[in-house]
Image (cartoon, coloured by chain):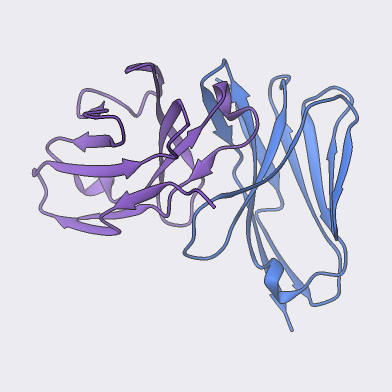
Chain colours: A blue, B purple
Amino acid sequence: GQQVMQIPQYQHVQEGEDFTTYCNSSTTLSNIQWYKQRPGGHPVFLIQLVKSGEVKKQKRLTFQFGEAKKNSSLHITATQTTDVGTYFCAGPRNTDKLIFGTGTRLQVFP
Amino acid sequence: EPEVTQTPSHQVTQMGQEVILRCVPISNHLYFYWYRQILGQKVEFLVSFYNNEISEKSEIFDDQFSVERPDGSNFTLKIRSTKLEDSAMYFCASTDNRGGIAGAFFGQGTRLTVV
């Protein structure tokens, strides 16, 4: 079945450092979505990418969708303690199932 | 801002008992989902529901599980004969489009503890 893997599993950074998480799907995706889950919280939708090679920015967050539409990345510039949480990519399988990646847990030290 | 609400926030149940987890999706949404997250692990798809019927389900969603939309607002997940390994966070989500194509809205979750 379709698998969506993310690396790294954990990342600890000093506040102000950059952070990147990578998402890889075993199959081509029609779109890729990114979610953030704060500790003890629920997944919150961040963004969706649809086009091959698409790049979108949200303030310090940059999202990229690979040319082959099988991988994606999220880059955070100059992390802040508010960035702490687990970042999940997710891709639809068939039409009514959203498969979540394994997640990257980000810890930011002040 | 509209939100998905789930009750209860925490449920403790004895092994073998039945539990019903409740969700009120966003009012104009048509597609509903249940996901499960075992502590510290990834978010796992259980089932999707559209037009009063299941549209997709995972291999986890066996005969122990059932979903229902008993009225125009509630969406429930019933787990029969709970097992220890059913202990997890259960999230309800809803969207107004297929596959959550523009992002799914998640509820705060119900933490189920089976003892």
Q: Can see residue B89?
A: no
Q: Position of residue A96 (x, y in %)?
A: 51, 20
Report x, y in % for residue A6.
Answer: 68, 43
x and y percentages locating residue A74 in the rendered image: 79, 49
The residue lying at 28 percent from left, 37 percent from top is B74
Is residue B20 in view?
yes
Which sits in the foreground, B58 or A8? B58
Q: Quadrant of residue B12?
A: bottom left
- Relative to A72, residue A36 above or below: below
In the image, residue B111 lies at what x, y percent? 31, 56
Between B108 and B84, the one lying in front of the other is: B108
Dividing the picture into quadrants, the one containing residue B19 is top left
Q: How many marks?
A: 0
Residue at the (55%, 38%) spot, across then down = B104
A80 lies left or right of B72: right
| Residue drawn where x is 85% and y is 75% of the image | A16
Q: Quadrant of the C terminus of chain B?
A: bottom left
In the image, B101 versus A80, the foreground residue is B101
Q: Is residue A9 above or below residue B95?
A: below
Could you tell whether A86 is left or right of B29 in the image? Answer: right
Task: Between residue B34 and residue A70, name the one nearer to us.
Answer: B34
Among all residues in the image, which is located at the extreme bottom? A110
Indicate whether B104 appears above or below A69.
below
- The answer to which quarter of the image holds residue B53 is top left
